[in-house]
Amino acid sequence: MQPVVEGSPRPTARTIGVVYLLYFLTSVFGALLMKGVVVPTDAVATAQNLLAHESLYRSGWEVGLVANALYIAVTALFYGLLAPVNRSLAMMMAFFSLLGCTVQIFGGLLQLAPLTILGDTQLAGAFTVAQLRTAALLSFKLYPLVFYISLVLFALFDSLLGYLIYKSTFLPRFIGVWFMIAGVVGLTFLWPPLALPLRFVIIPVGGLAEIVLMLWLIVKGVEVSRWREKAGAPL
């Protein structure tokens, strides 16, 4: 059979690390732009913040959209790097990540809906101010429920990514194990009442695994000879 790919994977590995870093920087920046606008227990304060900082809030949402696009790019690059290990599992891994990003993108409409609810003059004529503010806050309360779905999908992505890294031999096995653990604990979001009290443990486990992998790819890359061996072997 023809080799899966030709040439050295080192630039690809470094590219993944750099795009990964751009994703982290972009997502953090977007979150900072939106920070403090939503007050989960106060519909009045949330509405006032949104109307007072609409441009800043929209910018944060748009930056978050860019972050999702970058993660899709990271996913595609991971597929190219890990397909030589097991093409079918790599495809499943990419599918779960793409699905998770898609859920987050469409779920983000719940973050934009309050701007329409509070700023639409026709709605203002049909509903009271209190009703519109309550509807806006309800949209924000529904968003986490959608976000939890994406976390379950990313937990499946982490599990498969970890397994492929573990079996690859051209990346450290401890990172693969770390990702598989992150995937298992991330599945607790199937039942949010269990996951929410543990989120201060669950989220750092997955986040640190990604940061370690990102730094490894940027600084160390992959074992080129072993990757070539995998890439040249029939799948």
Image (cartoon, rainbow, N blue to C red):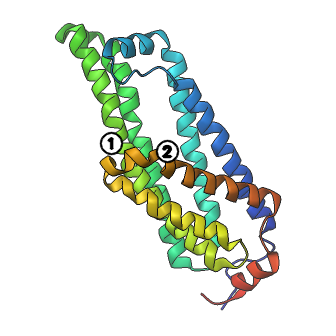
Q: Earlier in the sequence, mark 2 or mark 1?
A: 1
Q: Are marks 2 and 1 in contact (CB under 8 Å)?
A: no
In depth, the one of 96 and 177 nearer the eye is 177
Q: Which quadrant does the N terminus fall into?
A: bottom right
Q: Which quadrant does the C terminus fall into?
A: bottom right
Q: Which residue is mark 1?
A: 145
In depth, the one of 235 and 25 nearer the eye is 25
Q: Is residue 133 left or right of residue 148?
A: left
Identify which amino acid the numbered label 1 is placed on.
Leu
Rendered residue at 70%/81% (across/down): 231
Q: Which residue is mark 2?
A: 200
Near mark 2 (Cα within 10 A), the count class, few <14, some 14-19 or many ≥20, is few
Under circle 2, the secondary element is helix
Q: Is residue 134 left or right of residue 19?
A: left
Q: Quadrant of residue 10?
A: bottom right
Please identify, in this view, whether the residue under mark 2 or under mark 1 is nearer the observer: 2
Residue 170 at x, y percent in the picture: 73, 76
For residue 107, above or below residue 43: below
Rendered residue at 35%/13% (across/down): 119
Rendered residue at 33%/11% (across/down): 44
Q: Is residue 224 left or right of residue 197?
A: right
Identify which amino acid the numbered label 2 is placed on.
Phe
Residue 72 at x, y percent in the picture: 56, 53
